[in-house]
Amino acid sequence: MNFSAFFSYTLLTAYTPGPNNIMSMTNASKDGLKRTFPFLSGVCTGFIVVMSVCAAFSSLLYAFIPSIKPIMLWIGAAYILYLAWTVWRDKPHDSRGGITQANSFLSGMLLQFVNVKIILYGITAMSSYILPYYHDVISIALFALLLSAIGTSGCICWAIFGAAFEKLFCKYRKPINLIMALLLVYCAVSLFL
């Protein structure tokens, strides 16, 4: 296996803007890094489940991608657009200090099941880099965990960035929310390009 190509692909995919990273940064800038932990835990859990499914059924999914791809694209795009709307209509912090609806374990986990970028990340990594060289269950399971860890590390970095610049984000909340919402819209539109 070409490990340099594998790590280049996985790291670039994990650290480029996408729904997970944008939501992690937005949540951490609004609620702080500590309060974003449930969302990040949900992302990690969802990653593990999706990567496990990709590992277990990669060959079957690869054969059926032409028939399920349009459905995955429309569902994923609709959810990403919903997230964009949530980011755009966000209100400033309230004094009660509650966690935003988009910053929950369930929200982070469910995002993985409609995040076409993550599904294709798993299928591509499995079918192009892993399955041609590794066939035993333990190796494939370890690679699924590695893919999950790399993907989650990207979200954590974006969340740290969001928390570090919280004051800046609070001061320029509307323009930054607009930019983040437009990036999410771009993520949804790019699914069809």
Image (cartoon, rainbow, N blue to C red):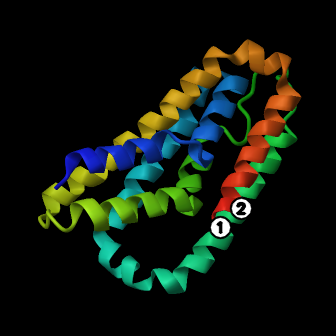
Q: Residue at x 57, y 58 (%)?
A: 115
Considering only vertical position in the picture, is 61 above or below 98? below
Q: Residue at x 50, y 45 (%)?
A: 43
CB atoms at circles 2 and 1 under 8 Å apart?
Answer: yes
Disc marking residue 189: 2
Query: Does residue 148 appear in this view?
Result: no
Q: Is 33 left or right of 74, judged from the image as shown? A: left
Disc marking residue 157: none
Q: Is 15 left or right of 159, judged from the image as shown? A: left
* Cα–Cα span, label 2 and label 1: 7 Å
> What's under tag 2, amino acid-wise?
Val
Q: Residue at x 74, y 27 (%)?
A: 98
> What's under tag 1, amino acid-wise?
Leu
Where, quadrant-wise, is the N terminus in this rendering? Answer: bottom left
Dividing the picture into quadrants, the one containing residue 75 is: bottom right
Where, quadrant-wise, is the C terminus in this rendering? Answer: bottom right
Considering only vertical position in the picture, is 173 above or below 178? above
Query: Nearer the viewer's eye, disc 2 or disc 1?
Result: 1
Disc marking residue 193: 1
Q: Is 153 left or right of 26, judged from the image as shown? A: left
| Dot 1: element | loop
Considering only vertical position in the picture, is 43 above or below 68? above
Residue 139 x, y percent position in the rendering: 15, 56
Dividing the picture into quadrants, the one containing residue 30 is: top right
Residue 19 x, y percent position in the rendering: 62, 48
| Dot 2: element | helix
